[in-house]
Image (cartoon, helix red, strand yellow):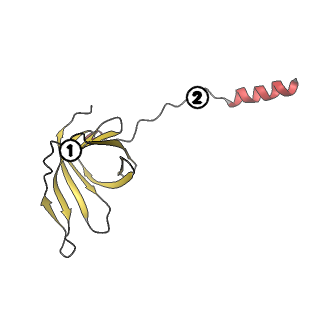
Amino acid sequence: MKTIILIFSLFIMGCSNDHTPNEEPNIPQELIGKWKIIEVYETDGGSEPQWRDEDTGAIYDYWFKSDGTFLQSDGIYNGTYTIDTSMKLTFTINSPNTVSIEQLTSTQLIIDFLNFEPYKHKYIKVSSESE
């Protein structure tokens, strides 16, 4: 009987009431909202990379929400995203795709696709809507 009481006491002592709620994701407030692509930085394989105008025709290309979800191309695709401390942005629709945030302000976003050749997208914020 003493053994059962001892085991039960150890079990109770091992259970802690110190519950830490889930931490909020590391999402910069400037990222929240709808973004439209305006330029692409790339090379044709033989020339120096350069910025060129881009327009997908969509109202927005990415809508980053404060809960860690996003919509892409006017809501056609949706998924989740995370940002680590080195500003690596990982999108997940069917599988994870990691890019680097090169620049983020309240009105402009540049992401680097981390390819072997330079390939970046520049976006402007078209709305600060979070939901």
The mark found on residue 54 in the picture is: none
Marks 1 and 2 sit apart, C-alpha to C-alpha, by 40 Å
14 sits to left or right of 57? right
x and y percentages locating residue 118 in the rendered image: 26, 66
Q: Quadrant of residue 121?
A: bottom left
Give the residue drawn at x 86%, y 28%.
Answer: 3
User: Badge 2: how crowded within 10 Å, few (<14), some, or many (20+)?
Assistant: few
Q: Which residue of the protein is positioned furthest toward the bottom in this rendering?
A: 46
Identify the secondary structure beneath mark 1.
strand
Pinpoint residue 128: horizontal percent, then vertical percent: 21, 36
Mark 2, secondary structure of its residue: loop
Location of residue 1 by image quarter: top right
Q: Residue at x 76, y 26 (%)?
A: 9
* Amino acid type, callout 2: Asp
The answer to whether residue 85 is above or below residue 51 is above
Q: In this rendered view, identify the residue nearer to me: 38 or 86.
A: 38
Residue 18 numbered mark, or none: 2
Looking at the image, is mark 1 or mark 2 nearer the viewer?
1
Q: What type is the residue that disc 1 sits on?
A: Trp
To which residue does mark 1 refer?
35
Residue 86 visible (yes or no): no
Q: Position of residue 15 (x, y in %)?
A: 66, 29
Q: Characterize the local packing of mark 1: few (<14), some (14-19) or many (20 or more) Cα atoms within 10 angstroms.
A: many
Q: Is residue 77 in view from this perspective?
A: yes
N-term-proximal mark, 1 vs 2: 2
